[in-house]
Amino acid sequence: MLANANLINVLLMLAVMFVGYLFILIPILIYYAIQHMRSPQLILMPEEEVYDYYTGKCGSESEWARSRQFQEAGVYRWQQNFILVWEHVESATYFQVTLSPYGRFHNFTTLFAEDYSLLTANDRESLIFPAPPRRFVQSFGIEQIEPLYEKHASAVEDLIRIKHLELCQEFPEFEESYLASMQRQHEHVRSVMFYPVRGIWWYHIDRRSRFNRPIDLQQAVLDN
């Protein structure tokens, strides 16, 4: 009987921990993540430190970027993350490597006219929040840069062909584009009623269901 009582107590404790994680911790984390987007600040790293990031920590990414005519655009720090940026002005595209305490992540962002954009990443976190209007986001579990870039380039071609988008002619500085993107994300999520609670679904279900799936072109045609 004592053993059964102990087992029941353990199960009850696990159930309470699970409910607390699901309904308390996740909404709190979602809330604070959005609050950090309210007034984001990027810190441009000094030139004497930039060289080590491009040639040392991310030498393979730099080699790939040069092979594709991407130019170095700076290294930034945001919270605990270091962000290395390359740009390809002709295709209005940024290539970004994020070094975080949780790993190394790659993404590509192409800017179109009329504030449209496409982000292709290789982490699930890029899919946590619903994208603001005119932003398309897709993410794949692809570690190699070239296959990820091919996924991105294919989606760019599809959007140009099907939605008749045009590449951005006045390509902004990365910092300007990045900060504006985060602020738009902040405003969009804040407009969702009970967004910290909705974040339970976004975190556990939505981001997983959208991972390794290209953007929905039919929906893209309908979106403004």
Image (cartoon, rainbow, N blue to C red):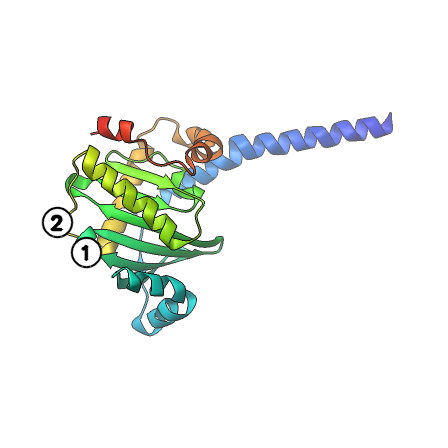
Is 83 situated above or below 124?
A: below
Residue 169 tag number: 2
User: For the residue carrying disc 1, how many other residues have a C-alpha within 10 Å: few (<14), some (14-19), or many (20+)?
Assistant: some
Q: Secondary structure at mark 1?
A: helix
Q: Secondary structure at mark 2?
A: loop
Give the x, y percent position of residue 27.
47, 34
Quarter of the figure that contains the N terminus: top right
- Image location of residue 154, percent across then percent down: 29, 43
Quarter occupied by the C terminus: top left
Q: Nearer the viewer, residue 45 or 138?
A: 138
* Residue of label 1: 89
Q: Earlier in the sequence, mark 1 or mark 2?
A: 1
Q: Is residue 155 visible?
A: yes
Amino acid type, label 1: Val
Q: Which quarter of the figure has residue 58?
A: bottom left
Coordinates of residue 146 in the picture (x, y in percent) = 36, 53
Q: Amino acid at mark 2?
A: Gln
Q: Pick whichever, 224 or 217, lies toward us.
A: 217
Residue 64 on image: x %, y %: 34, 61
